Image: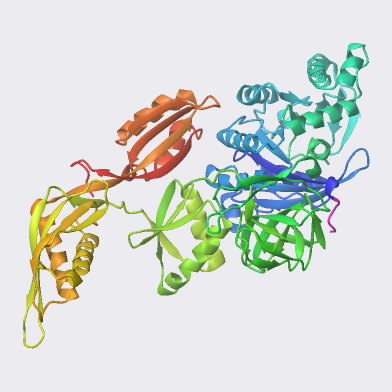
Amino acid sequence: MDAAPTPTHRTVAVVGATGAGKTTLIEALLHRAGAVPRAGRVEDGSTVCDHEPEEIARGMSLGLSLATLAWTCPDGAERTLTLADTPGHPDFVGAVDTALAVADLALVVVSAVDGVQPGTWSAWSTAETLGVPRLVVVTQEDRARADFRRVLAELREAFGQHLWPIELPLDEEQSFRSIADVLSEQALVYDDAGRHHDEALPPEAVDEEHRMHVDVTEELVSHDDEQLDAYLSGQEPPAADLERTLAREVASGEAVPVVVSSGVTETGVDRLADLLCELAPAPTERDGRIVVGVGADDDDTEGQVVPVAADPDGEPLVHVFRTVADPYVGQVSMLKVLSGVVRTSDRLRNATTATEERLHGLFRLQGKEHLPVDHLAAGEVGAVAKLAGSPSGTLLWSRPSGRARPYLPPRRPPVYAATLVPASQSDDERMSTALARLVAEDPTLVIDRTGDATVLRGLGDTHLAVAVERLARVFGVHVETGPVPVAYHETIARPAQAEGKVKKQSGGHGQFAVVQLRVSPLPGGGFEFVDSVVGGAVPRQYIAAVEKGARDAMAAGGPQGYPVVDLRVELYDGKSHSVDSSDMAFRTAAAAGVKAALAEAGTVLLEPVANVTVTVPPEHQGAVLTDLSGRRGRVAATEMADDGRARVVATVPESELTRYVLDLRSLTGGRAELTVEPAGYERAPSTVRT
């Protein structure tokens, strides 16, 4: 398949809640376009987009998958659509962010049975933040309890009155076979093969459809002076002219069309494909954005946001938006050409990592299938294999120097964690490399270390479970997971003085050192070493060894077994021997002296705390406040966000947050947004048991 000219290509992010029918709808679109001989089923694991074993086993999308189709519009124009299938599960919202960052249009899929759900809100919010135009399709109209009118009311209540139905189901549930086209005021009647013919509207639907027609028409002509003048003089614009006006309003975000379909019976699917081609803005109509002047080691470093026109004659500029390990060809990088034209064998430099890359072979993706192309032009989406130094969220360009990165939505901070324990020595040796590749695929995963434990952090328990499964299947690294240990610390309870002594003599050279120490708390100060020795009681060459010994004792842990922090150690006196003293002797003596002071004065337990921000609809604010109080949280602020939701800011012990994201979803019906940021240490109450 050759790359299509830029104005004929559209990239559509298919977003919405879990179970809304996104993957089934894409399957129906591919089938109607002739891209697949028969439509697959999610239940059978036979769809194009849900092809990973983890997705098939769970019966839902878990990552970003691409599919391509060619479509001939009613006016004879040829279009190429790249559909980005996205998960609806909140653990995989990073894939939704990625898809919307490269989309020309967001197709928001809403179930006619379940209506507006948390996944709908999340996808809508991200699309709005990124300025991506939207079209809503109400699917599953063939299912029992389907109710388009109820769902339309929910949509308008949730997202505003600028959502305009341009289709109306003439029947629902098992009888769903015909649709009223609100603009043309014709009935589209479908056969069992998903093809339609036009008929007059049935008498019982005429009044309702005409009211909708008048409302939509008056809204559209109010944005076009010529059409408005004609309309006021009694000349109603034809449906084709209204669609062109609607396309402009969709591109500007002033209107969001609402249509209906069934991915199972394919009723309305051909009309949906027409509308995607006609209403989605061409890439040339919307500037992309990149951030230039970023730092070498931190992709999030602030820089200057620069618009980029999707010009095929411009400088080659490519956004690598997703990487995935393929068991047959190695790493596959999904990319969007922001400017210029790229061809097989081109050499470009990664503007983020500075790695020189060669495009070994370009292709479009049809799920896991590769469809070769010889070039990709500005605005088009494709993929390439074996880019060694271009992780997700980086740019390729032809410039020999300089740094830049794509303009992306804020990165989702991790809110759930588990420790990873290799199953064997071989797994231990290969785990670091495999984890690095896993994080390169999915930047919402984070690897860190807590004590001696390797910790994997992500957006939820399912997120981490899938990551562990991929570690085993793709990278051959098997691990066990466990809870993350709370990184407690301890500090001295009160000032104390102690002596540290080393005195060994067994013939020949011995070991001798004596130090006198004052050890006291240093709240929030970490560690401070003070040299108060006068008169050379401890020679200058051994002072550094004393400090090292004090640090050794702190790292080894206090009486409760945890690392010691926030300590002031003052060396004020000591003794040495001209022959038997050494750095090691004084280091050992200092460590013994600090341990003695800790034992004498006792220690207090310090627990890590985090700043927690929860954003929820106002009706859930009381439940969230009560729950945080039960977790020993201290509420610092409650305020209203710009979108009308309530925002609660609190400081909560990390030991109380192990499963908080999961409990919060249950408490709020999945409507909460959560961020957790470390906020240091505080003294733990005596009731805490470690």
Tell me the residue at 86%/38% (across/down). Answer: 195
Question: Where does the image place residue 643, in percent across and percent down from the top left?
Answer: 55, 27
Question: Where does the image place residue 484, in percent across and percent down from the top left?
Answer: 36, 53
Foreground residue among 239 and 254: 254
Q: Is residue 494 left or right of residue 250?
A: left
- Quarter of image, res 649: top left
Foreground residue among 109 and 641: 641
Q: Is residue 90 left or right of residue 21?
A: left
Q: Is residue 262 above or below residue 221?
A: below
Q: How is the image coloured?
A: rainbow
Q: Is residue 134 left or right of residue 542?
A: right
Whether residue 366 is visible here, answered yes or no, is no
What range is drawn magenta here?
1-5
Labels in figure, total: 0
Tell me the residue at 82%/23% (across/down). Answer: 182
Question: Where does the image place residue 47, in percent across and percent down from the top left?
Answer: 69, 52
193 is within the stretch colored magenta = no
Name the residue at the top extreme: 233
Whether residue 660 is visible here, answered yes or no, is yes
Foreground residue among 574 and 437: 574
Q: Quadrant of the N terminus?
A: bottom right
Name the residue at the bottom extreme: 508
Tell me the residue at 41%/67% (across/down). Answer: 422
